[in-house]
Amino acid sequence: MTKVKTLKATALFAVLILGTPIAPTLADPKSQTNEVTIDLAGHKVPVVAGGLYDRYHSNPPLSVIAEEDPSLDLSWFKTLDKTRVDMGFESYSPNFYYRNSRVTLVFTADIDRLTALMPAEVLAQVQPLQIWPGRGLIALTAYAYHYCDNDSYNEIALSVVTSKPGSANLGPISLIGQSLSADLWGYVFKLPVDTELARVRGVVGYNLPKWLTRIDYREDVEALSFDVYDSESGELDFTLRANRLEDVSTEPTLVTNSFTNLDHAGQLSWGHAVSRQLRHASTSDADSATLTLGDGSLSNFIRSLDPGRMIKYEYVPEFQGALYAPEPLATLLSKE
């Protein structure tokens, strides 16, 4: 296997992080054998019998969440209103994520390759941010959603950092502006998940490139680790091991992560998630995280982007989230 270690970054770009979030204190639904099958947009989807999704289909009362996990601070969720939406299936927006962890590694990558992988319709509105000649940025984020409206699951997101729709692409200046405003934009290349419920909801409801594969999350006293398996061969594709950082802030901060893509009708759309980061830290230390690539399809895709210098490692062992249903991009642009 090929090992890619993080490299130290310049202070100018160490402000960046792109990512939207995930050891379980509650029972892990994926470890339980009792399942029921539901119909979701014409797909037969197994869900945990008696789990949150089986009982409430994305709209559990916060009183139920408080009863099941009294340790949770639900004050932020009480300020958010859910609305019924049609996303190709009936659901509620935003989807709530009550207890989660994530780690994000941001690398430089070949900007021509990044541009070539984006649809022309999307490129007409947003472009990869060039931080120096020939180099853009990719963000690899690993999420462990321990307890959410969709029960629990793990997810890996690989995105390119882009300009904001309706705004000029000023490269490093745009990058710094997004970071300072905690309003981060990207285009999602890959998004494997490890439950069929997460896959179908993501593909049908959010127009995202999700597929089902095995993702093993584990933690020890030193690090959080994700083993990601190839969906076709079943072999280990890559491992991401991210060290626990000592200087962790407990000051809650809100970060918005947004993406632009095409809906199922080929029309431009956008979606966003807001994260309330409860414990978080970051560094550009070369030894803080290790990405070990193998021979699977996702490892090979990452290599094709010519990943280079790491700009930032962000460690978020505890966060909460609200994922909103996508909307036509024209709706956003009309507000600008």
Image (cartoon, rainbow, N blue to C red):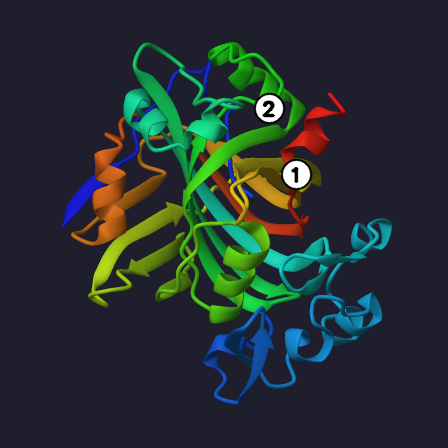
- The residue under the point 54% across, 35% down is 260
Rendered location of residue 317, percent (x, y): 54, 50
Please state which of residues 316 and 18 is positioned toward the viewer in this rendering: 18
- Of 203 and 155, which appears nearest the observer? 203
Q: Amino acid at mark 2?
A: Pro
What's the mark number on residue 328?
A: 1
Residue 102 versus residue 183 in the image, above or below: below
**Element at badge 1?**
strand
Q: Label 2: which residue?
A: 165
Where, by quadrant of the figure, is residue 78 drawn?
A: bottom right
Q: What amino acid type is highlighted by mark number 1?
A: Pro
Report crowding for label 2: few under 14, some 14 to 19, many 20 or more residues within 10 A (C-alpha).
many
Q: What distance separates the C-alpha of mark 2 from that of mark 1?
A: 12 Å
Q: Residues within 10 Å of mark 1 (few under 14, many from 20)?
A: some
Left or right of 269? Residue 199 is: left
From the viewer's perspective, tell me whether residue 65 is left or right of residue 19.
Answer: right
In the structure shown, which secondary structural element does the residue marked by tag 2 occupy? loop
- Residue drawn 39% across and 26% down? 137
